[in-house]
Image (cartoon, grey):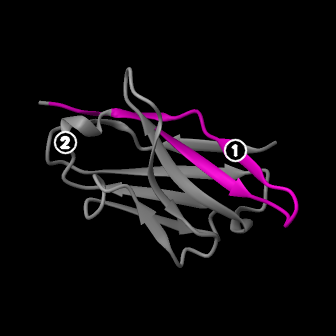
Amino acid sequence: QVQLVESGGGWVQPGGSLRLSCAASGFTFSRYAMSWHRQAPGKERELVASITRSGGSTNYADSMEGRFTISRDNAKNTVYLKMNSLKPADTAVYYCNARGGPTMVQYEYWGRGTQVTVSS
């Protein structure tokens, strides 16, 4: 039942922008911290950005700070990643992640990813 479905990926020229969405279902979305990760070919998966359950705090990797913005809409069970000033180095599969649950039990879920390609 638990699903995280990413969308919004595609091809964009350097300097362009994309907005990724992750639609969540099958769990209590507002009780989970959400994050975006990415993985480029031949590279390890890395954290892009994270956001707390209420959306009150965000965190970004240094290379994304100032260019990317993570946000969430708990009423829509959706987390977003707005990406500006995209560079070829941003080319990767972007994954949505949920982490949380009851006090003594933590769960983690992953989406299947959406491809982002930045090139001329």
Relative to 48, 24 lies left or right: right
x then y, percent, for residue 49: 45, 56
Residue 109 in the image: above or below residue 74: above
Q: Secondary structure at mark 2?
A: loop
x then y, percent, for residue 55: 55, 74
Within 10 Å of the Cα at label 2, are there few (<14), some (14-19), or many (20+) other Cα atoms?
some
Q: Which residues are magenta?
A: 92-119
* Tag 2: amino acid: Lys
Q: Which of the 4 image quarters holds residue 87?
A: top left
Disc number placed over residue 87 in the picture, else none: 2
Question: Residue 97 magenta-drawn?
Answer: yes
Find disc 1 in the rendering and name its residue: 109
Q: Which of the 4 image quarters holds residue 28?
A: bottom right
Q: Nearer the viewer, residue 53 or 59?
A: 59
Exactly how many numbered labels are in the figure?
2
Q: In the image, what residue occupies the spot 42% across and 56% down?
A: 81
Question: Residue 1 magenta-drawn?
Answer: no
Within 10 Å of the Cα at label 1, are there few (<14), some (14-19), or many (20+) other Cα atoms?
some
Relative to 63, 110 lies left or right: right
Residue 80 in the image: above or below residue 42: below
Q: Nearer the viewer, residue 76 or 45?
A: 45
Give the spatial CA distance, label 1 vs label 2: 28 Å
* Tag 1: amino acid: Tyr
Residue 50 in the image: above or below residue 23: below
Relative to 41, 97 lies left or right: right
